[in-house]
Amino acid sequence: QPAHHARNMTTPVTNSINVVGRDVSKRQRAKKRSASFSLDPVSLLNEVGIAHLQNGRTSEAVKYFKKALHRVQGTTMFSDSPISDDFDIVTDFKHAKVSSSIKCEKDDAENSSNTKSNRSLYIYQREEYDEGMYMYKEPICLEECFGDNRLTIAAVMNNLAHSLVDGGFYSEALEWFENALQKAYVSSTTAPVNRVALQHNIGHCFYRLGRYEESLACYHRALLSVCELGMTELDMAASLNCIAVIHFHNSSSEVAKAMEMFSTSLEIRRRILGSSHADVATVLNNIGRVHYLDNKYKEALIVYKEALQIRRKTLGKDHIDVAATVYNTGQTLHQMGKLDEAMELYKEFLEMAKARLGTNHRDVAIMYKCIAQIHQERNEFEEAKKMFEAALQTGQAALGNCHPEVASTLNKIGNLSYELGQLDAAMSYYEEGLTVEKAVLDKDHPHIIVTLTNIAQIYKQRGDYMAAIRSYREIHGMQLRVHGPVHIDVAATLSSLGLMHYQAKDYVAAFEFYQDALSIRREILGEDHADVASTLNSIGLVLFKQDLFDVAKECFIESLRIRRKLLGPNHRDVAILWYNIATIFLEIGEDDEAMKFYKETLRVERSALGYDHHDVVLTLQHMGQVHQQRGELNEALGYFKEAAEIERRKQGNDHVSVAKILNLIGNIHLQKAETKEMIDCYAEALRIYAKSGQSADTLVIAGYNFYALSKLHPECAPLA
């Protein structure tokens, strides 16, 4: 099951583009704030709020911005009357400026395992790894409002909204940003609160809430405002990047549109900011994700590596945005099969995530899972199991027991258990994962379908076909609700239902399900598709079991035509059809035709699979049986002996498959009344059966010339 990708990590951007139209530098603002003790109470409250906001004390910032808003809306802005609590405000301002760095470090240590992202169910859009969606996040100093009461109210509302965003309260932030926009809908590009910044911030809130269409509309309005007001190209680049991100997440059909906008944004930022700017790296990282999801891993790796080089240089090796690109680069290398390089980057990200996010964070759990998958692909199963268990433990600590990431890890452990042949353990993990998925996902979510499919597969392995059928019927019902009756996934489930009924020997039901699957596949895929050929082969097998040989043969022949057209004459799947057709001729007594098709089967198998493949052994045995039925015992003996030699080379002298072929050879010697050779073969076969724990009854003595044997060796009959 997938996991599976890849947009587990999204990419942040540094706040290098200042709020549009604000030409006051940070140094100038710092000078103003150094003299802020002489300012009015509203400005002081706003300054205290800004100090708390910039040092991560969100709840304190919200409190002071609300106090400022209450005062500015309830009193005259520059009242000459003294305010009784001015001294307390100044004291709070000093405290916020002096002690905030210590407090911030303490908060980080205490809350590292309880970050605000843990409250969110979004897998791809995560606050820690912004994609350039939140560009205009500088708080506004009221001195920039020049006594305009309307702008002052808008500025405080804007700052309050930023505090709520910082706390992850996007619905509340959205309301305050919209109120601020109503208060300060001005055209001037020099206004401290302008509509482009507010439109961006409203779009960002909608984006975080998963309301993509509304977010897209806001960013489009921001882009229009940039053009109307004649603002800078960098403002245009910021809007284009945001619109492209929405298109990227919206639908695979909009990826081309996203790439076009990303490319334009990148060109502008490279030209103005230079190729080594952090904002350039942000767009490169976004472009890498587009390439990744389009399976263009080589192109993705090129841009990820460039983004990583820029971010390490501009942000420092321990920055969280560097970690994001480290992860993306590792994931790309993983998909390219470069496991050692991927593992190195995964481990680097793991250490960075533990240091920055804490040991009990969902991204630490995700990284344990990625490392486990590499161990599993290397067949290092013990290490894989340890990492998966660490991922599960960390995920449950970070997210609780009922979360999609936890369910994903449970299913991964189930997959590992299945691969190791531990079916009971695999079933237990799958069922636990299914319980979580049904609790937290939509009732027809694709992940639930994948888990039900895995459970059905275990039922199939156990031979519990009716239980498998119940699982597939549940899947079928979900797919009908989501896709309707004519969909390729529906056809796949119908085919699985056909197979289960075939295994249960309910050939009538199997035929009906396969027919429905064939009808859908022909309608969607056309006549000459590999899945159509596969379904025709399955229908042929069902008909063969019902002794409807002529119709079965027609299905096999049509399937053969399609596969030869698609795969060429020397493919293993083509050989399967030659084999099936030959077997029909053998059943209806047309030995010459059977032998002709078996010879073609053997030729293709040797070409596609080599001379020692198991399929070659089976075909040699069938060819020997044809000669045996025709009384051509020497020819039969030759094919059986060749099959036995292959099995001895591959499996060793004591393998059961060798015993079965020796049994066949012994029966040929029986037919030829070659007693010594017959006894030698039977005795060796019995020895192997006994060594492998099978009874003597496993030996099957059969032939057409018992009479001749009894004449040559009359002692055999009474002894038998």
Image (spheres, rainbow, N blue to C red):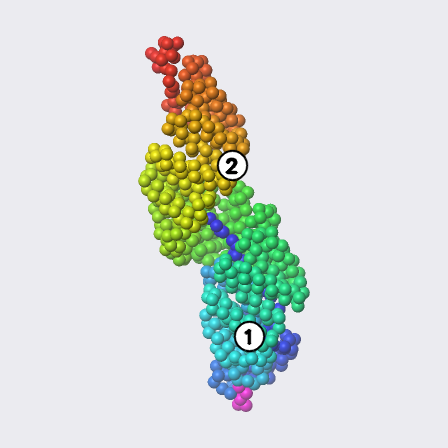
Q: Answer left or right for 406 relative to 318.
A: left
- Which circle marks residue 225 in the picture? 1
Q: Mark 1: which amino acid?
A: Ser
The residue sitting at 49% across, 21% down in the picture is 638
| Quarter of the image where the C terminus is located | top left
- Mark 1 surroundings within 10 Å by alpha-carbon count, few (fewer than 14), some (14 through 19), many (20 or more): some
Please rate how many residues cluster around mark 2, counting C-alpha atoms within 10 Å: few if below 14, some from 14 to 19, many from 20: some
First in sequence: mark 2 vs mark 1:
1
The quarter of the displayed image where residue 132 is located? bottom right
In the drawing, does residue 279 fall left or right of residue 707?
right
Within the magenta stretch, is there residue 80? yes
Quadrant position of residue 378: top right
Name the residue at 49% across, 79% down.
Answer: 182
Q: Residue at x 40, y 27 (%)?
A: 590
Q: Residue 310: x percent and y percent?
A: 65, 60
Q: Quadrant of residue 323?
A: bottom right
In front here: 413 or 57? 413
Number of callouts in the render?
Answer: 2
Q: What number is the disc on residue 608?
A: none
**Are dots 2 and 1 in contact, CB under 8 Å?**
no
C-alpha gap between disc 2 and disc 1: 62 Å
What x and y, as percent, mark residue 409? Answer: 47, 51
Residue 36: x and y, percent? 60, 81
The residue stretch that appears in magenta: 77-82
Dominant SS of magenta comes to loop
Describe the element under mark 2 as helix, strand or loop: loop
- The answer to whether residue 36 of the structure is visible from this angle is yes
The residue mark sitting in front, 2 or 1, is 2
The residue tagged 2 is 569
| Secondary structure category for the residue under label 1 | helix
Tell me which residue sits at (51%, 36%) in the image.
Answer: 569
